[in-house]
Each structure stands twice: as structure tokens, then as C-alpha cells.
Amino acid sequence: MSVHLHWFLPTGGDGRTLVDRHAYTDGGIKRDRITPVSGVRAPDIEYLAQIAKAAEQLGFEAVLTPTGTWCEDAWLTTVALTQVTDRLKFLVAFRPGVISPVLAAQMAATYQRISRGRLLLNVVTGGDSTEQRRFGDALDHDRRYARTDEFLQIVRGVWGGKPFDFQGEHYQVEGGLTALPPDPLPEIFFGGSSAAAGPVAARNVDVYLTWGEPPEQVKQKIDWIRGLAEQQGRTVRFGIRLHTISRDSSKEAWATANRLLDDLDPETVAAAQQALGKSESVGQQRMLALHGGSRDKLEISPNLWAGVGLVRGGAGTALVGSHAEVADRIEEYHALGVEHFVLSGYPHLEEAYWFGEGVRPELAARGLLDELASPLTGVPAANGRPASAPGGAPLLVAGGR
């Protein structure tokens, strides 16, 4: 089982600080700032294209694009980026409650033809009722998962190439059909830590995603989902969502993590923790429990740092250390059964190069990767780094404040 490496498209904004979009009074829609913040980058298509091209050059298999109020639309953004990349796949996040399942199946089929088979789907059921109501969805937490179950059954049904009928609590479909089914069928990624989420994953998905918890907790999740899937006569694969701060030395990596922490004033952390604490997501509550809102003891497991989760919802932990140490931790998760690693870092352009040029060769040397052709392959190394990035600095496609 090889490791599959994926990166992240920050369609809600990027920067050299964890605060990024929170630096704006309107969440970043009009870019009106509360106070001047250095190094904040708008998620315009030119910048996102730089990240996508870098990810492709560095050998990442796909990039995850998020969904939500403060993000650009994932379908439209990524289909545009298929036109400036050749091999990179796009893991498109979407909410099943705000789109027809038959229309979603049709969109996926069209996307596969436009992109020549480069679509992956990330189903986001939603853990925040306020956010869901903003999109016109009034269901409670558990009923949202029940609806997702029906949604995915319909999507797979209409991909069969012949009329499909379905009668459920949330959907009724007569003769649902995708006239030209997608080829290949997109793999379906899905995450959820609640009791309501597990059976949905077991019955419907290809890859179950967890946020970056310590290895023992991840193992418990894997055992849980694997057992449920076996009861359904299915096999589910596993992925993990993490940030990374990888440097030529452990000291440099932790200095970078501490700098990100120094940018966060107590008021910002308190406000973020109060907002995140209202989430109905069990996964989000598990993320918050890792640090309890405190800056103390943020290394919750060797090289696993919970500082990101002080202000960021969702994935709140980062692998921090030298390239070899980060590779060690990936190998540790891989030994538990984790196959897909969906990674990110601030800023996303530079951190893609730090990881791609530093950690990826370590993983390849350990036989954990199926090698992809890359423009950097075979470039002589200098001081342990490709000659494209002399002096130990990351190779930058574009500058920033």
C-alpha cells in the first residue's frame, strides 16, 4: 500500500499568519480589513493557479478544495484550474444538502470529461447548523447524515447508466439517469466522527478521512469504520487531514511554529475558541479537546502540534519537525492503515515546496511512494535540497508580503 500525497487550495485566502481571513471585517469577501495584517493573500485565480502548478510539479496527486461561506465555489474554481494543469487531480468538497443528488452525479460526469478523469469528491455533511441554514438547510445533525446516506446511494445508482428509482425520507427519484456516466467513477472521500456518520461511511464511501489526531486515536477510528464496513461486506480505505511545517532541521521547524503562535493575541484565540465551541461537529469537538484553548503543551504527540486549532476550524494539527521526522510520523500513520495524506501549510505555496522537496524524497527512499514524473526528478541536490532551491530556502514561484 503506497502513500498518496495531496495538497490544499486555500480558496478562503492565504498568508503568512494563521489569522488570514479573520483579518477582514467581512470574512474576506470584499477584503476590508479590521487592522493592517502583513502577508495576507487574496484567493484570486492567478494565485491559486500558482499553488496548483506547484503541487503538480512537486508530485502531489491531488489538491483538496474546501466548501463554505468564506470560500470560492469549489466546482467552478477547480474546473478552471484543470485548464492550467495536466495531471493534478482535484478533490472537490461539496455539501449534499444544497444540491440535487442527480444533478451532482451529472456535474461529476461532465467534470470527468472536461478534466479527462481528474475529479475526486469530498462529501461534507456539515457540522454547523448556522452555516447550513445560510444555505437553506434546516435539518439537525443526525438527519443531515441520514440524508447524506440517501444522497450517496442515489449518486452511485444514477452512475449505473440506466434509469434509477429511489424512495427515501429525504429524496424521491423516478428514472434518475446520468446519460453518460463518469469514466472513471470519482472516488468518494468522507469524514465524520459521530455515531451517525460511521454507518454512512461504511455503506457508501471509498476513503474515510479523519483530522490529525494522535496515532492511538486514529487507530481507534480506523478500527471502528473498518468493523462497520466489514458488516456491510465492503472495504474502506483511510486518509488523514494535516498541516505540515517541515524544515531542514527540527529547530527551524519549531521556530516557524512558534512564530505562527506569536502572531495570535489572546483576544483572537478566545474569540475563535468561543465560535468553534458552538459547533455540532463531533470531529471539531475532538480537535478542541486536544489543546483545550491553551497555548501550553501544544505538542500533543511526537511532532504533532495543535497550535493551528487555536484559531482554525476543521483540521487543527500540524506535523512539525525535520523532513525525516515528518516522514517518520507519516510512516507511523501509514502503518496503522492510513493511505491518503491531505496536507497544507501557511503559506500554501511555500510550504508545498518545503514538503515536496524535503519530505517527499524521504518517503520515496523508504519505498512508500509510487513515483510520478516530475520536473525536479533527477536534479542534483545541494546541501540535501534540490539545486532548484539553493541555500536551503524554499523555491518560490512568487513573492509575498
Image: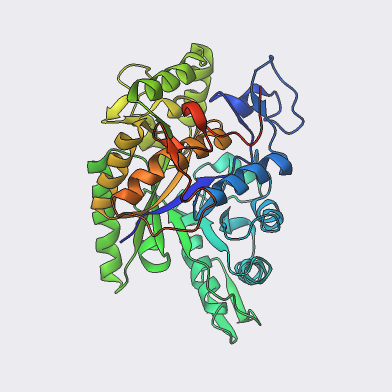
Q: Is residue 75 above or below residue 180?
A: above
In the image: residue 323, left or right of residue 92: left
- Where residue 305 appears, x then y in whole percent? 36, 28
Measuring 30% from the left and 66% from the top, which residue is drawn there?
A: 229
Front-most of 46 and 9? 46
Quadrant of the frame with the C terminus? top right
- Where residue 284 appears, x then y in whole percent? 42, 38
Measuring 53% from the left and 66% from the top, which residue is drawn there?
A: 151
Front-most of 342 and 275? 342
Measuring 69% from the left and 54% from the top, which residue is drawn there?
A: 84
Q: Is residue 143 visible?
A: yes
Front-most of 284 and 28? 28
Circle count: 0
Front-most of 33 and 9? 9
Quadrant of the frame with the N terminus? bottom left
The residue most toward the bottom is 162
Q: How is the image coloured?
A: rainbow
Residue 233 position by quadrant: bottom left
In the image: residue 389, left or right of residue 29: left
In the image: residue 123, left or right of residue 222: right
- Where residue 191 appears, x then y in whole percent? 42, 52
